[in-house]
Amino acid sequence: MDKLFDNLMSFVQEGEIEASITEAKRAVEEDGIDAVEYLQSVLAPVMNNLGDQFSRMEIFLPDLMVAAEAADGIRDELMQYIEVASDAQKGKVVIGTISGDNHDIGKKMVATLLGVNGYEILDLGTDVDPMAFVNAVKRDKVDVVAMSSLLSTSMPFVSETIQYLVAMGLRDQVKVVVGGGPVNPEWAEEIGADGYGHDAKQAVDLLDRLLA
Ligand code: B12
């Protein structure tokens, strides 16, 4: 995986979006790497590494935007190799990135992996208003509300969503799970969520456990 990480990292750092996508495709087709494994073990670490570089001010926002475009392109390209479960019977999940937050790379990865593992996914996108999650519980009878928050400034809206669910008598009908950079298990417990997932794989394990 180290070689694949280095390959992808160098293309992304050079801002070579097309070459990044071609490299991901090559890894799957020629090296025989499983597409989901590539997303989890190559693309995610590359993005996280770039995040660290951004924090140290070694790279800047335009670099991140190019990286995000490459990540989106790679995910779209690799979808053709990923078998989404046609009998999505494990449960229905509404997922979204909370109000004020437009980060969606990780959220899409979680949605993809849950879909692959037999969950029906209703993806509300990014910058999702708390009431939109509440409405999905009311209207669409979802089993799980999954909220992603990458910005500390948006975290209060995650908590607000749970408070609305409680106030409207809907909290007992659904499981609520949370994830994203600044989120941790202690905070998840504090705001009354049912669980926290550190990555997309953990999200699947968490839902399997909660809905068992
Ligand atoms: C890419 C990126 C961007 C891209 C986003 C593109 C896109 N379409 O998503 C762009 C360039 C647009 C961007 C913009 C901004 N960003 Co930004 N960004 C990042 C970066 C580098 C990577 C995020 C990412 O995609 N990681 C890879 C994915 C795979 O990981 P992930 O998102 O964490 O998701 C995994 C897990 O967290 C988990 N997970 C995620 N969601 C969920 C949900 C559930 C339910 C579960 C169970 C699990 C789960 O599973 C995922 C898959 O494994 C992070 C740094 C970092 N290390 O996180 C900063 C970061 C999140 N950004 C940051 C900031 C400040 C911003 C801006 C405000 C910058 C600015 N000054 O304008 C804007 C905000 C715009 C907005 N309103 O949202 C800060 C946030 C700080 C904070 N704690 O509040 C970070 C941490 C950078 C930093 N160190 O300062 N950003």
Image (cartoon, rainbow, N blue to C red):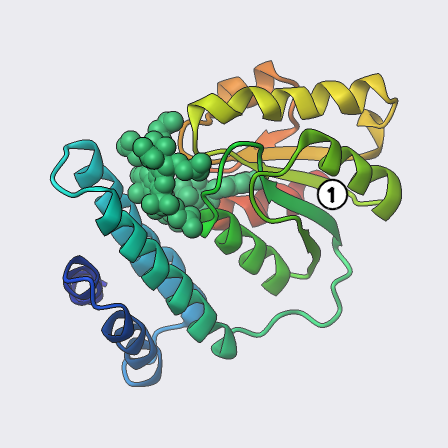
The N terminus - image quarter: bottom left
Q: Is residue 64 above or below residue 99?
A: below
Residue, far left: 58
Q: Closest to the observer: 173 or 63?
A: 63
Tell me which residue sits at (64%, 45%) in the image: 95
Q: Is residue 94 visible?
A: yes
Left or right of 21? Residue 124 is right
**Ligand 1 sits in which quadrant?**
top left
The residue that disc 1 covers is 211
Q: Is residue 153 above or below residue 61?
A: above
- Local crowd at mark 1 within 10 Å, few (<14), some, or many (≥20)? few
Left or right of 118? Residue 11 is left
Q: Is residue 199 visible?
A: no
SS for tag 1? helix
* Kind of residue indicated by mark 1: Leu
The C terminus - image quarter: top right
- x, y (%) of residue 73? 39, 67
- x, y (%) of residue 85? 66, 69
Tell me which residue sits at (42%, 71%) in the image: 35
Residue, far front: 62
Image-quadrant location for residue 72: bottom left
